[in-house]
Image (cartoon, rainbow, N blue to C red):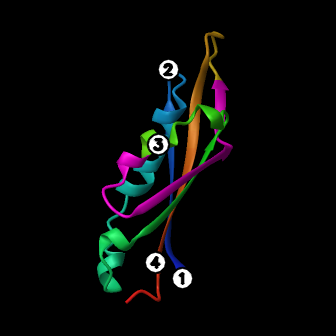
Amino acid sequence: MAKTRMIHEFGMGTSLRRRDYTEAAARAIRDALWHNSVSIAEAFGFEKSDMIIDVEIGAQDPDAVDTAGLMGIFPYGQPSITVKKGGLDIPKPDGTGVTVVVNAAVMVSFDMEAA
């Protein structure tokens, strides 16, 4: 396979009150995806289902992100999600918890050798 990266988009998501890393990650992915309208698959003669979508999530608590729960965000393509340490946990001024900030990088590739 000649996997060739065509696009990368970046997003940020937050969980202000619930310390929900998965929801913050979902918001970061949507931020990356929904701020663009790219018809890259059609431009190269591919189907949208041919998109190879690699997602990297940065969160302060990587184990708290449910990657299986994030897969449904993608309407098409072949997504894979990895999570690593990143993002921010910002303490609330009154000491009652943190605001979670998660970052996402979404990279779209195609097998340029496809028939």
Residue drawn 65% across the image and 27% down it: 90
- Using the rendered view, name the quadrant where residue 77 is placed: bottom left
Q: Secondary structure beneath disc 1?
A: loop
Residue 18's label in the rendered image is 2
For marks 4 and 1 on the same chain, the one whose residue lies earlier in the sequence: 1
User: Which mark's residue is nearer the viewer, 2 or 3?
Assistant: 3
Q: Do the residues labelled 1 and 2 touch (CB within 8 Å)?
A: no
In space, the residues marked 2 and 3 are separated at their CA atoms by 20 Å
Residue drawn 40% across the image and 70% down it: 51
Q: Do the residues labelled 3 and 1 touch (CB within 8 Å)?
A: no
Q: Are marks 3 and 4 in contact (CB under 8 Å)?
A: no
Residue drawn 50% across the image and 20% down it: 18
* Residue labelled with disc 4: 110
Q: How crowded is mark 1: few (under 14 residues within 10 Å), some or many (20 or more)?
A: few
Q: In which quarter of the image is the C terminus?
A: bottom left
* Amino acid at pointer 3: Ala
For marks 2 and 3 on the same chain, the one whose residue lies earlier in the sequence: 2
Q: How crowded is mark 4: few (under 14 residues within 10 Å), some or many (20 or more)?
A: many
* Amino acid at pointer 4: Phe
Q: Secondary structure beneath disc 2?
A: loop
* Residue labelled with disc 3: 68
Residue 1's label in the rendered image is 1
User: Which mark's residue is nearer the viewer, 4 or 1?
Assistant: 1
In space, the residues marked 4 and 1 are separated at their CA atoms by 9 Å
Is-magenta flag for residue 2? Answer: no
- Using the rendered view, name the quadrant where residue 110 is placed: bottom left
Q: Do the residues labelled 4 and 1 touch (CB within 8 Å)?
A: no
Asked if residue 90 is positioned above or below residue 51 in the image, the reply reads above
Q: Quadrant of the N terminus?
A: bottom right
Q: Residues within 10 Å of mark 2 (few under 14, many from 20)?
A: few
The magenta stretch is 71-90
* Amino acid at pointer 2: Arg
